[in-house]
Amino acid sequence: MAHERVPLTFPPGFRWGVATSSHQFEGDNLNNQWHAWEQTGHVKPGEICGKAADWWEHAEQDFDRARQMGLNSLRLSLEWSRIEPRPGTWDDAAIARYRQMLQGLRDRDLEPLVTLHHFTNPLWLEERGAFLAPDAVERFERYVTHAVEQLGDLCDFWCTINEPNVYSVMGYQLGVFPPGRKGDFRATVRVGATLARAHAAAYRAIHRLQPAARVGWAQSLIVFDPARPGNRLDRMVARLQDLAYNDFFPHAIQTGQARPLISALAGDLSEVRGTCDYVGFNLYFRYLVRLSLRHAAELFGERSVPPGAICGDVDDDAQYGELFPAGIERMAKAMAALGKPVYVTESGVSDRHDTWRPWVIARGVKAMHDALAGGVDLRGYYHWSLVDNFEWREGWRMRFGLFGLDERTQQRARRPSADLLGAIARANALTPDMVATYAPASLDEIFG
Ligand code: BGC
């Protein structure tokens, strides 16, 4: 007998949104370290962010798109270098524009989730050593306090820092984000630890001003599985990669400590313990890991993707793994160990022709439904992203938008995935009809 396909429904009030960031969307952020980095040809192939998606002038037109889709939330970030262009100097016009944007979201019934740091630093902070500067934590706390004093009546849902592990690993270990240091393990750990202290200081500063605020951070997670599941050494090196990449921040927040091998470098993290009201995580990829003595710098783990795996539009030299929306269930369960509500603060794919995105969305929604059924207090999903945007070191060649963007003309073109996510948000459910329309090949994978 044919199996009856039942819609996957979500709890009332579940958040369906999109995630964005200031540098990647606003345009003309000329006073941060990424702008300087772009000027020196570090972005492939020599591209710059330029006007980005022109949000400083016209964000509201995209807010209309999000509203028309039927979303109920939108994640954006504040650009520190606009708000505090010089140390201790606050720009009222920048605050006025952010007030207008947050009000614009509220007017459209889109709850703002506001990130306070998404990879970019004011140039003056970068020149002092960024998060290696002795006063970085106080500086961050002061900026956060100012932002919350000025904007707190329009937002009480904050994400302190986006992907602290990406910021430290890309900037100080791999050298592909500014400041471009390679293999500086000490600095990688010290930056990670300082970001944890900056997060904790921001958490407390926000709660002093807004006792009922919801404050968390967005953790980048990658799934690491053993290439040969039966092989104990592969399992060990996969676990090592998991610890090295995924674990530092959640562990510091859960225990107020770093793991033994790095605790001397990380310093005292006791003040970090318990500083979150929710856990946000960003999940895109999985790697298979096998023991390899040739890969000492990667903790003896050689990463690969299975033959034929779906990776999105990537070049061979890009560091993107196998797309793995199913991993949302496992990671949501792992993050639930912190005892707080969980949000998927990013998931998505670079996919110019919208070939895989509908599957990424539908399979991710199924994974969230499974996590909820398994008892996880999962509260929302933010797709990266609403429109194509400037993808850091990859520049404009990667296309993560539900809407395509021609960055020269600023024309948008709706991709079918926008209709799928909109239908899910409006129904607060994923139905077999939606999957049959947008991602038919995955019907069995999703509805059994
Ligand atoms: C970041 C975004 C980025 C996205 C896609 C995340 O690591 O938070 O800024 O554009 O992934 O790579």
Image: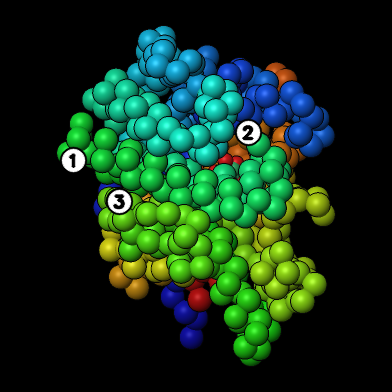
Q: Is residue 118 above or below residue 154?
A: below
Query: Residue 282: image x %, image y %?
Result: 50, 52
Which one is in front, 395 or 163?
Answer: 163
| Residue at x-position 71% and y-position 64% | 297
Query: Residue 113: image x %, image y %?
Result: 37, 37
- Please name the residue that numbered disc 3 is placed on: 271
Q: CA distance from mark 1 to mark 3?
A: 20 Å
Q: Is residue 261 visible?
A: yes
Mark 1 beta carbon near ligand 1 (under 8 Å): no
Q: CA distance from mark 1 to mark 2?
A: 33 Å
Residue 212 is tagged as 1
| Residue at x-position 46% and y-position 50% | 193
Q: Is residue 290 above or below residue 38?
A: below
Of labels 1 and 2, the one closer to you: 1
Q: Quadrant of residue 402?
A: top right
Q: Quadrant of residue 195?
A: top left
Query: Residue 231: image x %, image y %?
Result: 66, 88
Q: Secondary structure at mark 2?
A: loop
Mark 3 beta carbon near ligand 1 (under 8 Å): no
Mark 2 beta carbon near ligand 1 (under 8 Å): yes
The residue type indicated by label 2 comes to Asn
